[in-house]
Structure formats: C-alpha cells, structure tokens
Amino acid sequence: MVKRILVLDDNQDILDIVHETLTYEQFEVKSTSVSTDVLPLIESFEPDLVILDYRVAGTNGGEICRNIKVHPKFGNTPVIIFSAYVNNESELISYGCDSIINKPFDLTELVEKVNNLL
C-alpha cells in the first residue's frame, strides 16, 4: 500500500522539490503552503507522515506538531520539522516531533528520514 505524506511549507520552491522527490520515491504526496489547512487535510488525507516547516506565515510548525500529537486519531503519526533556525534541537523536540531536518537540506537525507520513520 502506498504511504501518504503531507507537506507544509510556505516556500513554493521547497514544496515543489519535496513533492517531486517524494512522489518519485513512490509516496502519495499532498502539499500545502497554508498552515490553517494542515489539520483539516490530516483528517481528510490521513497521511502516514507529516512534514512541517517550523516558521510558516501566521503560525509555528511546532505548535501544529503539538496539535497533531494530541489528536486522538493521529497522535502516533510521525512528524518531521524543517527548520532553517535550529539553535537548539531540544526546543523543536519538545513539540513532540519525531525528526528534524535543517534547511538547507539534502534530498538524500530527506528520503532516508522519511523511510526510517515509515
């Protein structure tokens, strides 16, 4: 069965390359640049993994991660946080994410982390 991945980033170039890379790796990918779309998309798309940008216009990816992790149905869904602003990884881990990818990132690292979590 094809694994589903939901990606949130407000940088369209990053969304495009991540979407293309993960689709090439045989995942079903849904992307959004709007943070308020994430929880409704999780409920309708039912992803096996979520990738969130830490700093997204209007919100904090860490808070979205925390909301996912307390959700009764999706609390066990792995979450990766992208961040260009990692000064202290323990701060991001405190949101409950399962992995962190520092921007700029290597596509090989992205695919490895996704595969390891799935």
Image: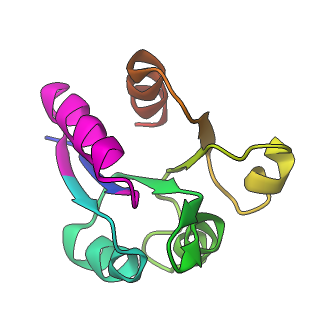
Render colour scheme: rainbow
Image coordinates for residue 58, horizontal then vertical, percent: 53, 80
Q: Quadrant of residue 55?
A: bottom right
Residue at (15% x, 41% y) in the render:
2
Residue 17: % across, % down:
26, 35
Name above or below for residue 95 compared with residue 63: above
Name the side, left or right, on which 107 lies relative to 1. right
Near-viewer residue (78 or 51): 51
Residue 15 is covered by the magenta coloring = yes
Q: Which residues are magenta?
A: 8-29
Looking at the image, residue 73 lies above or below residue 88:
below
User: Looking at the figure, which quarter contains the N terminus?
Assistant: top left
Q: Say whether residue 36 is magenta.
A: no
- Report x, y in % for residue 63: 64, 74
The total number of labels drawn is 0
Tell which of 49 and 58 is nearer to you.
Answer: 58
85 horizontally vs 46: left or right: right
Residue at x-position 25% and y-position 58%: 31
Q: Quadrant of the C terminus?
A: top left
User: Left or right: where does residue 49 sit relative to residue 47?
Assistant: right
Foreground pick, 87 / 48: 87
At 14% from the left and 26% from the top, the residue drawn is: 24
Q: Position of residue 6 (x, y in %)?
A: 31, 56
* Residue at image coords 41%, 16%: 108
